[in-house]
Image: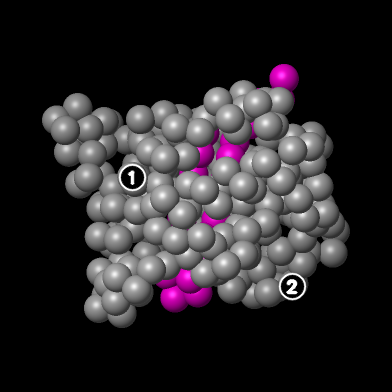
Amino acid sequence: MVKTKLEKTISSYIGRLLRDHFGRGPGNVVCTVSGPYVVTQFSDFLSPMEQSLMDSDQTVYVEKTRDLMMETLTKEVTSFIELNTEGRVAEFYYDWNLTDKTGMMIAVLTAPDKEHPLPEINDYKNSGALIEDIIQITTAVQKPPEETYSIMQNPRTLLIVRKGIFILLEKELIRLGFHETLRITKRNLEKRFLFEYKERFEEHLDAELKDIFVDWDFDGDKSFILLHLKPS
C-alpha cells in the first residue's frame, strides 16, 4: 500500500516522539488515515528498562508508567495531527502488547480527511458473524453494547467500534476517578476473552490474526478494538 505524505509525516513524528520520551524508538511505524480515523501501529518497541521489569514480573508497573507517559504524549500527538489536518481530534485511544513489543494509537477527527476516504461500514465478508462474536464477548465481560460496527480500514487493519458498554459499577469508578485501575483491569480481561476467539476471528476474516488492541473513552462510553491481520 502506497502511503500518502500525511501518513508518512505522522509516522515519522510518532517514531521520533516515542524515541525522545522512552529513550528507544519503535523499529517500524505505520500510519493509515481513513475518513476521521488516524491509526498508527508500531512494532519492536520496548526499552531495556521495561524488559528488565517484565523479566522481574513487574509488567503492571510498566503498564502504569506508560499510561502516565501517555498523558503527555496524547497532547503532543493530538496537537501535531491537528496542525497537519483540517479537523480537531475529538477522541484518542492507545494500547500496547508488551510481550510482542507492539502498540497502536487511534485519533478520531471531528471531520473526515478529504484525501483519505472512509470505507463502508461492515463492508467485508462475514462482518455480521464477527460483530455477533464481539457482542457476545462484550456481554460476557459487562453488557451488550448499545451499538457495534466495524471498518476494514485496509486488508491488515480492522477497526471495531462499541458504544454504550459500561455497567453501573464501571460508571461509578469512572466518576470517582479510577481511570488507570479500570483501564489496566479491562485491558487484561477483555484481551483474554478476545484472544479466546482468535480462531473464530481468523475463520471469519480468512486471515491470520497477528495482534489485538483495545481501549476506551470512559467519558464517552465508547471503545475501539483493532485487529491487526495478515491476509491469507
Which sits in the foreground, 171 or 187? 171
Q: Report helix, strand or loop for mark 1.
A: helix
Whether 161 is drawn above or below 28: the answer is: below
Residue at 69% from the left image edge and 32% from the top image edge: 205
Q: Which residues are magenta?
A: 211-232
Q: Quadrant of the N terminus?
A: top right
Q: Quadrant of residue 46?
A: top left
Labelled disc at residue 188: 1
Query: Which is nearer the eye, 162 or 62?
Result: 162
Residue 60 in picture, x, y percent from top left: 22, 45
- The part of the image, by quadrant, that contains residue 113 is bottom right
Whether 159 is among the magenta residues is: no
Front: mark 1 or 2: 1
- According to the picture, the residue beneath numbered tag 2 turns out to be 111
Q: Residue at x 45, y 61 (%)?
A: 143
Check disc 1: other Cα within 10 Å, few if <14, some if 14-19, many if 20+: few
Viewer can see residue 129:
yes
